[in-house]
Image (spheres, helix red, strand yellow):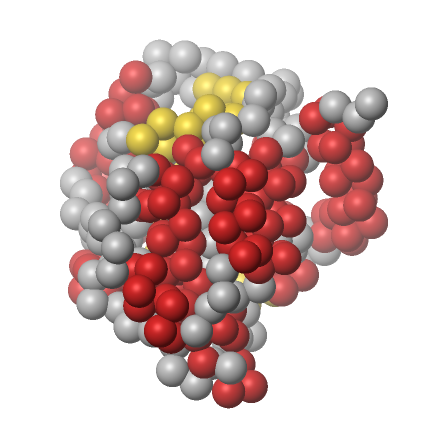
């Protein structure tokens, strides 16, 4: 009989060739996100798929594998999932404040995983059924989880913030169904289920979680807040909860006993904050799923591993 460890090893084996190819390309200037294994059920604005090769490089540069890896602003969770699937840390803690996104992770990592999978597989998507489903008041975490994934998959750009509308034309004129791939979403959900023993999920404030673990040298943090101090308008458009004290976040990061890696937009205001707290910075070029070249900023105490 196969257990969850067997399933995890099988998934690792399936990704071995691609993973090795990506590691050999770590020194390339631009990362194409289409080349990275997709593990999250979300289509997430500001997703960090592009960072996966750098994540491996960062954690691989350390003398010892981290005991605990914490992502205080988990969102779509690709970073935490990569750490868990590739055994880059002994344990992973995902933190998310948004109640809808939190319901998804609670359900996937909990006992209602298969209910959610079956609901996705059997849902007959069209504009009428989508509106009817999203008009319902969720009475359970699993129902809220389904509504959140549905909204994420059929809204323009995957945006969950209030006011976001459905995809109009979509891929090949398929409209709202153009990003609804039930079998693919369910496959990812069931894969994640195999990691339940190695991932804990916390619904709460990311900075408060950082403070809770700030004195533990065996904890490393990946910090990617919902929007930058330089992009408040974009934050309101993309995220339901989009207010954060960036100066406090940097101050708390300086107090961490363990290592951390932070990502922000490459903007003047962010460079000023990094200088204020004597952090190292390094710009990273990447391509989004539309092959547009973009630059983001890595921030840490010492980024010699990437330079």
Q: Position of residue 297 (x, y in %)?
A: 41, 53
Establish if 192 lies above or below 129. Answer: above
Q: Position of residue 266 (x, y in %)?
A: 36, 58
Establish if 158 lies above or below 227. Answer: below
Q: Is residue 220 left or right of residue 208?
A: right
Which of the two residues, 225 or 267, is positioned nearer the viewer here? 225
Establish if 246 lies above or below 162. Answer: above
Residue appearing at x 80%, y 26% in the figure: 2
Can residue 78 be spotted in the picture?
A: no
Q: Quarter-wise, where is residue 102 in the image?
A: top left
Can residue 26 be spotted in the picture?
A: yes
Which of the two residues, 76 or 57, is positioned nearer the viewer here? 76
Q: Position of residue 185 (x, y in %)?
A: 57, 54
Which of the two residues, 254 or 83, is positioned nearer the viewer here? 83
Q: Is residue 37 left or right of residue 200?
A: right
Q: Quarter-wise, where is residue 160 in the image?
A: bottom left
- Give the quadrant of the N terminus: top right
Residue appearing at x 57%, y 64% in the figure: 181
Which of the two residues, 77 or 99, is positioned nearer the viewer here? 99
Residue appearing at x 31%, y 65% in the figure: 132
Q: Quarter-wise, where is residue 246 in the image?
A: top left
Residue appearing at x 64%, y 31% in the figure: 194
């Amino acid at each position: 009989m196969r257990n969850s460890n067997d399933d995890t090893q099988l998934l690792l084996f399936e990704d071995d060739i691609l993973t090795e190819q990506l590691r050999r390309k770590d020194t390339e200037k631009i990362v194409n996100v289409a080349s990275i294994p997709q593990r999250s059920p979300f289509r997430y604005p500001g997703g960090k798929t592009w960072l996966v090769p750098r994540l491996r490089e960062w954690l691989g540069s350390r003398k010892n594998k981290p005991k605990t890896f914490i992502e205080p602003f988990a969102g779509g969770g690709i970073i935490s999932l990569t750490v868990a699937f590739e055994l880059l840390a002994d344990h992973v803690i995902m933190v998310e404040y948004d109640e809808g996104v939190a319901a998804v992770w609670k359900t996937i990592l909990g006992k209602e995983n298969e209910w959610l999978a079956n609901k996705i597989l059997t849902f007959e998507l069209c504009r009428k059924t989508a509106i009817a489903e999203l008009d319902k008041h969720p009475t359970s975490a699993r129902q809220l989880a389904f509504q959140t994934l549905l909204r994420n998959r059929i809204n323009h750009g995957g945006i969950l913030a209030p006011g976001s509308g459905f995809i109009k034309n979509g891929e090949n004129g398929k409209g709202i169904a153009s990003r609804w791939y039930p079998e693919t979403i369910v496959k990812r959900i069931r894969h994640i289920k195999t990691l339940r023993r190695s991932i804990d999920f916390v619904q709460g404030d990311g900075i408060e979680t950082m403070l809770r673990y700030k004195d533990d040298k065996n904890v490393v943090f990946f910090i990617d807040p919902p929007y930058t101090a330089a992009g408040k308008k974009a934050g309101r458009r993309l995220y339901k909860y989009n207010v954060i004290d960036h100066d406090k976040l940097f101050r708390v990061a300086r107090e961490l006993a363990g290592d951390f890696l932070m990502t922000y937009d490459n903007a003047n205001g962010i460079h000023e904050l990094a200088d204020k707290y004597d952090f190292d910075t390094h710009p990273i070029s990447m391509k989004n799923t539309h092959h547009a070249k973009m630059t983001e900023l890595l921030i840490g105490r010492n980024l010699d591993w990437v330079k």
